[in-house]
Image (tube, helix red, strand yellow):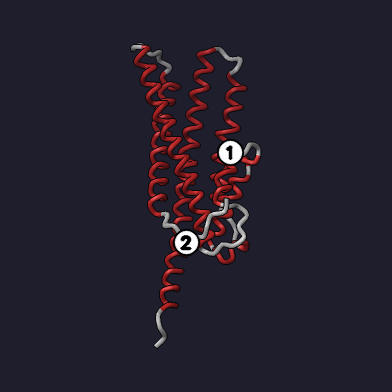
Amino acid sequence: MNEPDAGFRDPTVLTKWTRGLLYTSLAVSLVSAYIGSVFVTSGVEYEGSFTALLAAGFLWGTFVNLVALVTGILVLMWIYRANYNARQLGAADMEFTPGWAVGWYFVPIAWFWKPYQAMREIWKASTDPSNWRERSGSPLLGWWWALWLVPLWVLGSVSYTVTRDMEEGRAERIDALYGIAIDALDVALALVLLVIIRRIHQMQTGHWSRQRTEAAEARQPVE
């Protein structure tokens, strides 16, 4: 999975697309939270066409899943590129290859900590490629990983445990509250990840610009 040495790849376009989809997913989460809050606070039975309600729910669910899928793919592509570029900037002996910085998200059990370690390594290598082992990560990374794990692995189990013996109407209301909590955490997750991506992008392109300037100056003949 080692990437051949092909030079730094400008991540600007990929970063813009990734951030754009994250903003879209953030907006989707806000709308979903609003819909859930209306259901919880009103408690009014739907009196319209049940078929229309099912169709609207299906279309909205399809759109939400499509946004989540495309956003996830772009984030993974961005992580791959960020790891690769850190190496091209001079970060030697990194533990995680570009492929495994992405691959660990799909390995059971290891997906609880390996992706975080890979992102932390990218952050450190982007901060100071030539001396990255001496650098520290950012508290943002801890928040990002917690906001990823809690909705995915904790709240779902809590919701199931609480509602499994409840009457249907009350269980639906609890599920709606659970959905609102998930949407709120997804908004926070998107915001934190947006900051992380922006900061790593700035650090890497800054190093790249300086290295190109230094290389150009070194090629100039001495008078």
Judged from the image, the secondary structure of the residue bearing numbered disc 2 is loop
Query: Which numbered dot is residue 157?
Result: none
Q: Amino acid at mark 2?
A: Gly
How many residues crowd around disc 1 within 10 Å: few (fewer than 14), some, or many (20 or more)? Answer: few
The structure residue drawn at horizontal position 55% and vertical position 48%, both measured from the top left corner, is 99
Look at the picture and state if 220 lies above or below 145: below
For this view, does 11 lie left or right of residue 145?
left
Look at the picture and state if 91 lies above or below 194: below
From this viewpoint, is residue 8 visible? yes
From this viewpoint, is residue 139 visible? no
Q: Amino acid at mark 1?
A: Phe
The structure residue drawn at horizontal position 43% and vertical position 34%, both measured from the top left corner, is 29
Residue 47: image quadrant is: top left
Q: Which residue is mark 2?
A: 7
In which quadrant of the rendered image does the C terminus lie? bottom left
The structure residue drawn at horizontal position 58% and vertical position 36%, both measured from the top left corner, is 150
Look at the picture and state if 12 lies above or below 209: above
Q: Nearer the viewer, residue 13 or 148?
A: 13
Q: Which residue is mark 1?
A: 106
Residue 68: image quadrant is: top left
Label 1 to label 2: alpha-carbon separation:
28 Å
Residue 33: image quadrant is: top left
Q: Nearer the viewer, residue 98 or 143?
A: 98
In x, y percent, where is residue 117?
A: 61, 49
Q: Nearer the viewer, residue 42 or 53?
A: 53
Look at the picture and state if 79 lies above or below 89: above
